[in-house]
Structures are given as structure tokens and as C-alpha cells.
Amino acid sequence: MSRLPVFDFDDKLLHQGAEISRKLNQLRLEKFPPNAKKTLRPFPMSEVAHYLGVSPNNLKRLHLEGKGPEPQIVSGGRRLYTADQMLELRQYLDKNGRADAKKYVPHRKPGEKLQVIAVVNFKGGSGKTTTAAHLAQHLTLTGHRVLAVDLDPQASLSALYGFQPELDKNPSLYDAIRYDDGRKAIRDVILPTNFPGLDVIPANLELQEYEYDTPLAMQNSPEGKRFFTRFGTALQDVDSDYDVVVVDCPPQLGYLTLTALIASTAVLITVHPQMLDLMSMSQFLLMLGNIAQTIKNAGAEVRMDWLRYLITRYEPSDVPQVEMLGLMQSILAAEMLKTQMVKSTAISDAGLTKQTLYEVERSHFTRGTYDRAIECMDAVNFEIQGLIHQAWGRL
């Protein structure tokens, strides 16, 4: 038997990484326009009504009366609206409704603080990035001004939003929280997305430098000793621009995750209901609690409006998963979202083309598969939206 050939590890990794990146970019250029910018499908009147919180008949009446934006009329008389037109409809309904009627533009009011939601899990594969990406888009579709922040150096959320860091050479949050003279204002690292009202700070591998820089800064400067304030301080410059910030944290309890958590007003922990995942989560909670206590003793106020656990990739027919769900409910009932995110091929299939359920065309799936997935996703996100509004003191 011939001996296996010895190879240079670094050369192989660099070659394979570059080749994968090249193929991914080729796929992206096939799926998206040549400028590699994502577009967004139009929304049928039923969806628009759903996210506006009105009846389809109400929208139809507005159109027939020549009020509001002019939709595209397609075969069968179906009315389609762009995402920009959805915002225009919101403004119209808000402006022309009765003074005591429902408000259709849910922007923050004076005294309502910026909501910063950290989506976390210590273990990969829990659906954390999928949850963060869909939550940010849902909040935008329901009229909120949203900033999505990708804090994971692997940049999965960035890729889902149409960015390929190693090719696009976009900035990351590292540029706004680094310790040297290269630090930029956070406004300079924010980019628009294909959803009007949703901006993003993409990630790249440079984010990992923060994990290496911080221990050195802690030894050498006062700034380093209060590393956990850097993200929150940076956000102050754009506080009035957004209602909600959704942060996709890396699947590890490092300095990036801690910096995000201390800046947050709420935490969403995604959990896959299996024994090993729950064991990992329990260790994560114990470590996080101890670290948060240390940071609190150092002078940081670690206070949250809410903490919730979201069961992801749930299969109701899987008996062990049902048992794990029951176990969690017996311990954490008050902190668990009422809706579980059921496992769906619609989500994974949409991800193959770097799309979310809110972007993909319904016609690409069997009606039942898509409808079940989007109904579940909306239920989760409307529940989280309710918590945000409750934190603002709205009924």
C-alpha cells in the first residue's frame, strides 16, 4: 500500500478556500444581477395587507378610489406592491386615519429606547442566523427601522443578505470598535439592503481580530478594561435612526458576544431540542451568568427588558424532541416563546439561493410547504415584535 503524500497545510487551505470562494461568487452572479446586488420581489395584496394589519378589501378599495401608490396589475387582476410602496401605504394610512385609530408607522416615540436584540447560542446549527435574518426582515416589513449586525466572522448572515465578504471587501463592526487609530464612525460601516428600512453591518474575518486585540488592550489601556461598552457607545451615534437592532452573535462566548450582550436590551436564545444541545446550552448559561456577574461588579449595568428561548428546527413527530421540549417548558415556561420554529425544507431550499422566506417566490414551492413555513415564521416574529412593543410600554 502506497504511503499518503505529505502536503503543506497552509497551501492546501488557501487554495481550497479561494476555489470555494470563486465558485460561490460564480453562483451568486448566476442568481443575482451582474452588479451582485440583491433585488426584492413584489408582494401580492394579501401579503401587504397582512403586514400592514388591514384587510385586503381595504387596500382594494383604496386603489379603486385612486388613493395611495399605484400597484402593478398582473394576470387575473392580482395587485402587486413593491416594498417601497408598502412603506408609502403605511404613511398614507397613518396620515389619513382617525386620530384615535391604530397607528400604522410603529417608529419609536420620545422616551422609547432603542431595542437591541442579541440572538445567541453557544452551539452552531441551532438556526441562530436564520432566526436573526428573518426577524430583521419581518420587523422591516411591519414598518420598523432596523439595523442588522453580523458579528460572526463566518459572515453567514452577510451572505444571506447578498454580501460575500472575501470578494466585496466590505467593512465590519470591527472598524467601529477597534482600539487603534483606524477606528471609524459606525455610520461608515452601515450598508443598505434590498429591503427598504433595513440596513446591515456585514461581517468579515477581520472581526476575529477583536478577540485578539481585547486581551492586550485590557492590559495596556483604560479602554480595554471597559471593552464591553464599545458596541453600545458606537450605537449611540445612530440611536435616532433605528427602532430595533438585531445582532447575530458568533457561536462562542468570546469578547464579541460579551460586547454585544452588554449593549443589548433583550436576548433571544435559539435552541435545537436535543439532549446534547440542551447540555451545551446549560453550560453556556452558567458561563455567561458568571461572566456577566464579573462585568457587573466592574461597573457595567447588565439589565434586560426580556429574555426568551426559541425552539428551532423542531419536528413534532420526533418523540425525543417532544420530550426535550416538555423538559424545557417545565423549567423555563415563562421565558419560552409560545411558538416553535418547525423544521422546513422551504427555509433550507430558499437558503440555497441566498434567500429568506420573505424574499423567495411562493411559486417555487408546493403551496402547503411554503404556507406552513411562513405561517410559523410569522408567528414567531410577531410574538417577538409584541415583546418589543411591550418593552416600549405599548399595549
Image: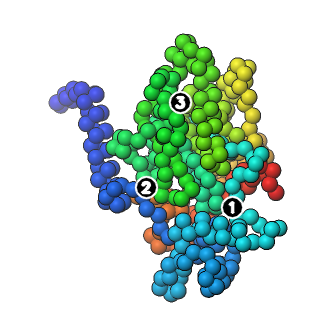
Q: Indicate the position of residue 249 as horizontal and vertical percent values.
A: 56, 38
Residue 309 image offset from top left, x and y in percent: 68, 45
Disc 3 residue crowd, few under 14, some 14–19, many 20+, Cα 10 Å? many
| The label number, if any, that marks residue 105 in the structure image | 1
Q: CA distance from mark 1 to mark 3?
A: 32 Å
Q: Is residue 272 visible?
A: no
> Residue 142: percent from the left, percent from the top?
64, 61
Question: Which class describes the residues within 10 Å of circle 2: few (<14), some (14-19), or many (20+)?
Answer: many
Looking at marks 1 and 3 on the same chain, the residue that comes earlier in the sequence is marked by 1
Q: Amino acid at mark 2?
A: Lys
Look at label 3 and name its amino acid: Ile
Position of residue 316 relative to residue 50, above or below, is: above
The reply to whether the C-beta atoms of the residues labelled 1 and 2 are less than 8 Å apart is no
In the image, 20 versus 73, the foreground residue is 73
Instruction: Identify the residue position indicated by label 2 in the image.
Output: 354
Q: Residue furthest top?
A: 220
**10 Å neighbourhood of mark 1: few (<14), some, or many (≥20)?**
some
Rendered-image quadrant of the N terminus: top left
Q: Nearer the viewer, residue 282 or 11?
A: 11
Dot 3 falls on a residue whose secondary structure is helix
Which residue corresponds to the image point at 33% horizontal and 43% vertical from the top-left? Answer: 167
Q: Is residue 8 left or right of residue 159?
A: left
* Amino acid at circle 1: Val
Nearer the camera: disc 1 or disc 2: 1
Q: Which mark is residue 177?
A: 3
Instruction: Check whether the beta carbons of the residues at disc 1 and disc 3 lie within 8 A of each other.
Output: no
What residue is shown at x 48% (from left), y 40% (from top)?
Answer: 189
Numbered disc 2: secondary structure: loop
The percent coordinates of residue 368 (x first, y second) are: 55, 71
Q: Residue at the spot x=28%, y=34% of the render?
A: 14
**136 horizontally vs 213: left or right:** right
